[in-house]
Image (cartoon, grey):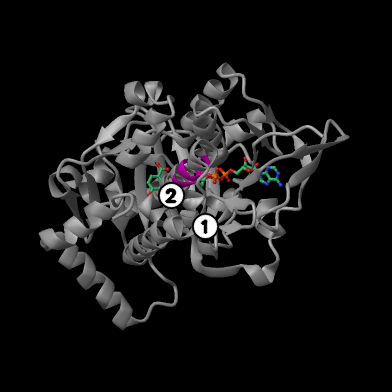
Amino acid sequence: MPSTQVAIIGAGPSGLLLGQLLGKAGIHNLILEQRSAEHVLARVRAGILEHGTVQLLDEAGVAERLRAEGLVHDGLYIAFDGQRQHIDLSGLTGGRAVTVYGQTEITRDLMAARAAAGMATHYEAAGVALHDFENGSGKPWLSYLRNGKPEVLQCDYIAGCDGFHGVSRHSVPPEAMKTFERTYPFGWLGVLADTPPVAPELVYAQHPRGFALCSMRSKTRSRCYIQCKLTDSLAQWSDELFWAELRMRLDPVSAAALQPAAAIEKSIAPLRSFVAEPMRFGRLFLAGDAAHIVPPTGAKGLNLAASDVRYLAQGLIEHYREHSSAGLNHYSARALRRVWRAERFSFAMTRLLHSFPDQGSFDHKLQQAELDYLFSSRAAQTALAENYVGLALDA
Ligand code: APR
Ligand code: PHB
């Protein structure tokens, strides 16, 4: 039977980064991805990287273009009640910043590095199924269809990096896993357009009509979002309507800088908080969106995927080099500690900045007071800043 040391399911950022780190350490791995490479590269996702994520991409040897083209942001803006407050991320955190670099570009860089290293990815692998991974002693294997033909792959470990809808988490017996979930009564309508950003840094806006965010991909390309109803359809949102609604929700300075342009991409995404525990079952390890989802308000999704992968790669490298299972045994607890802190922050940012349709007048007043406090307190701004730039890895 064909075999590898680590079989990775999913060629999103989690699977590709894990494969890259393992490959650099001489650990053989094969990725099975159900979609085509073109499909994976066509997905538009967030792009705010914590300092630790940039460092990890550097260690993986894929940060050259990111260092050259990524935009380093030392701060961000929060807009509320006609005002725009600057949050000095670097000044409040001892010099830490975030880097704006689209996730699609990270995926592209990782794919190129994988191809250059001669590591295999089987794209369009259909019907991937996991076998014999339940107990720690046996050898797990995968079955799948490639070009319509059945294939099998034996391995020492399986890394489930196949996102929220993947097969890995669903292969774990339900009684062996506990899930925690919260859904939100709204979504985000996102538009990508070739128009300069309204400000040199991101603007997160709270407004009675709903949340808005002006982000960017470069100095000439914007990525903007507005809170929308879950029942809204893209057909309801012409480009004109989108920009008009966004403008209404921004502070006057940001609104004046807004230059509407034709949408290159437009999509609606629901918001969700989700965690599955534990993140290990026998010889299967879950990483990234396969194990947890955060609402995008804190820009933590990709960064959490990166820290999972860092811990998992460390555990696997320790296992193969030093014959020690300590890292693998601690993986789930170590990753989950960071996951829950990011869940907390993402939830708090979401609650702070969105309009909740069922919000009573008391909750509304509390939200206003919280923003007022944030605008006037260095301590409150520091708490936001240290979470946004990323908490220390094992603090
Ligand atoms: N078999 C093989 N591959 C699968 C299967 C399956 N049954 N199910 C899903 N996949 C693939 C998807 O097609 C996708 O390419 O797994 C990949 C999972 O990638 P992501 O969803 O990007 O998840 P992850 O790599 O954990 O990335 C986490 O990136 O996706 C964003 O919002 C997410 O920012 C977060 C970060
Ligand atoms: C994005 O650029 O797409 C983006 C930025 C910050 C967020 C969410 C999305 O919080």
Q: Tell me which secondary structure the magenta stretch mostly adopts.
A: helix
Image coordinates of residue 309 in percent, x first then y, are 48, 43
For residue 259, say whether it is visible: no
Look at the image and give the residue range highlighted in magenta: 311-316
Q: Residues within 10 Å of mark 2 (few under 14, many from 20)?
A: many
Location of residue 318 in the rendering, given as x and y in whole percent from the top left corner: 48, 41
Kind of residue at disc 1: His
Residue located at (38% from left, 67% from top) = 355
Decide: marks 2, 1 in contact (CB < 8 A)?
Answer: yes
Q: Residue at x 52, y 30 (%)?
A: 20
Q: Nearer the viewer, residue 156 or 198?
A: 156
Numbered circle sitting on residue 304: 2
Q: State how far apart marks 2 and 1 are (Cα).
A: 9 Å
Disc sitting over residue 292 in the figure: 1
> x and y percent of residue 264 in the render?
51, 33
* Sooner in the amino-acid sequence: mark 2 or mark 1: 1
Identify the secondary structure beneath mark 1. Answer: strand
Position of 232 with respect to 366 (left or right) is right
312 magenta-colored: yes
Q: Quadrant of ligand 1?
A: top right
Q: Is residue 391 above or below residue 26?
A: below
Q: Nearer the viewer, residue 25 or 294?
A: 25
Q: Is the shortest distance between ligand 1 and the CB of mark 2 under 8 Å?
A: yes
Q: Amino acid at mark 2?
A: Leu
